[in-house]
């Protein structure tokens, strides 16, 4: 078999057999297929898509490239959660401790930043001392000890996804629905959870730009779950506006703590409550309404916050030493009116330009930098008011972040 033949077949919209998929993808893992060859195959998949059988086969190839977690020794229902990635999406840091504080086991392996969206592991690494990598034995022990874990993929669990994930990030192939589904579901199934909640971000600041594609991804992941007898529930959430007020690694960790401390009530809070309520509903087989009451109580009583602190301390993290850059630049409004929109894509590009994300696989992230949104949608602003604050160690003029804010005159809004 020849890798060029496999690439040509998919480029011509052919359906790849399991053997061809194994040859190409396992060959890449074994370094027999080169970056530029796999990049060509991934681009062909992006352009032509994949059949359900190809997706099922590739998911299974991903899973079998490594070990599968056996969580049967841990009592209780295990519920995993995943987000397809968005601007300011620190939901995992908030949801996992909420759900775990309610007695539900939350096994969560997360990834690094992909494209213009931040990664949970990058955020956790902004906490000095925090250990993101664990062995399979440590994974099970932490779940038994504190009921939750958020860690990077182990080298032995779905190693194929780890190398493909990094390549997709820098080759313009992050928004393929089949590849997104394979990446997510292979990790979720290999992690050993009984039930899986997927938060599909949809909008300009997400990998999935429109509702039709979001529904296509939702249905595909449910079909993959059914293929493995796993209950999969998907929510579709808006990502035209950044989640919360912080974009950037340490900034987002700080905001997560503020929310768990009951000090944040915004679109981030609403989404976290929705996702956590669905996870609790699935695990306890109760209504969403009853689950929501438990979730809100976990926040208000500070049980979820204490669980987060327990989790960080367990992994050697020191929140008191976490640093946000001392260098600040306030971006002022040049007109008066009401903010009617904040473009998540522009905010993300600016944050990445400051150093909070990667353009290449080898890039080093600056955990201290990012964007704080001083104003939100619906706020009245006057000329000279601060729209947002940039935290930087280097300044880039590639993007004008003021363009992210749509400001309309109050009279026009009233008339409309």
Image (cartoon, rainbow, N blue to C red):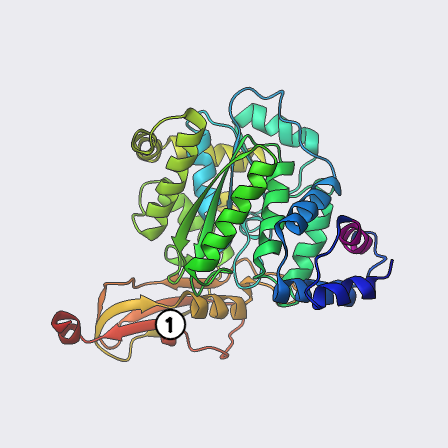
Magenta stretch holds residue 24: yes
From this viewpoint, is residue 122 visible?
Answer: yes
Question: Which range is magenta?
Answer: 19-28
- Residue 390, x across and y down, in percent: 43, 67
Residue 208, image x, y percentages: 49, 60
Compared to 377, does 322 lie above or below?
above
Mark 1, residues whose alpha carbon is within 10 Å: few (<14), some, or many (≥20)? Answer: some
Which residue: 56% across, 24% down? 145
Could you say which is closer to the camera, residue 322 or residue 207?
207
Nearer to us in this view, 351 or 186: 186
Give how far across and how far down residue 62 sits, in percent: 70, 45
Q: Residue at x 13, y 75 (%)?
A: 411
From the viewer's perspective, tell me whether residue 78 is left or right of residue 274.
right
Quadrant in which the N terminus is drawn = bottom right
The residue that label 1 is drawn on is 404
Name the quadrant of the C terminus: bottom left
Residue 36 in percent (x, y) is at: 77, 68
Tag 1's secondary structure? helix
Question: Looking at the image, which is closer to me, 169 or 43?
Answer: 43
Residue at 43% x, 49% y: name it.
Answer: 254
Q: Is residue 78 left or right of residue 414?
A: right
Visible residue check, residue 158: no
């Amino acid at each position: 078999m020849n890798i060029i033949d496999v690439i040509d077949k998919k480029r011509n919209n052919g359906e790849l057999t399991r053997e061809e998929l194994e040859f190409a993808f396992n060959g890449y893992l074994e370094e027999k297929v080169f970056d530029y060859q796999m990049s060509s195959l991934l681009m062909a998949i992006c352009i032509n898509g994949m059949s359900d059988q190809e997706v099922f086969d590739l998911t299974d190839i991903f899973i079998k490239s490594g070990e599968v977690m056996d969580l049967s020794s841990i009592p209780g229902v295990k519920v995993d959660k995943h987000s397809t990635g968005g601007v300011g999406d620190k939901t995992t840091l908030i949801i996992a401790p909420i759900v775990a504080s309610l007695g539900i086991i939350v096994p969560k392996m997360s990834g690094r930043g992909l494209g213009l969206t931040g990664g949970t592991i990058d955020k956790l690494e902004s906490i000095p001392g925090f250990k993101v990598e664990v062995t399979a034995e440590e994974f099970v022990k932490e779940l038994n000890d504190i009921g939750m874990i958020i860690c990077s993929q182990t080298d032995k669990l779905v190693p194929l996804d780890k190398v493909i994930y990094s390549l997709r990030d820098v080759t313009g192939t992050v928004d393929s629905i089949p590849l997104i589904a394979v990446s997510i579901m292979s990790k979720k199934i290999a992690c050993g959870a009984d039930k899986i909640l997927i938060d599909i971000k949809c909008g300009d600041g997400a990998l999935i730009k429109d509702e039709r594609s979001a529904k296509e991804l939702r249905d595909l992941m449910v079909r993959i779950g059914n293929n493995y007898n796993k209950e999969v529930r998907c929510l579709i959430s808006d990502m035209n506006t950044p989640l919360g007020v912080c974009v950037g690694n340490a900034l987002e960790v700080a905001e997560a703590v503020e929310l768990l401390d009951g000090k944040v009530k915004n679109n981030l809070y609403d989404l976290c409550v929705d996702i956590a309520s669905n996870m609790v509903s699935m695990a306890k087989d109760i209504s969403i309404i009853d689950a929501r009451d438990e979730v809100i109580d976990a926040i208000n009583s500070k049980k979820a916050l204490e669980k987060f602190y327990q989790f960080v301390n367990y992994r050697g993290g020191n929140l008191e030493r976490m640093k946000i850059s001392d260098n600040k630049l306030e971006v002022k409004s040049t007109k008066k009116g009401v903010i009617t929109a904040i473009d998540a894509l522009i905010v993300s590009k600016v944050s990445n330009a400051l150093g909070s994300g990667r353009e290449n696989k080898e890039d080093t992230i600056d955990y201290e930098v990012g964007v704080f949104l001083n104003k939100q949608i619906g706020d009245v602003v006057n000329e000279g008011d601060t729209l947002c604050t940039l935290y930087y160690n280097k300044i880039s003029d590639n993007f004008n972040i003021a363009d992210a804010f749509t400001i309309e005159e109050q009279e026009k809004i009233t008339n409309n």
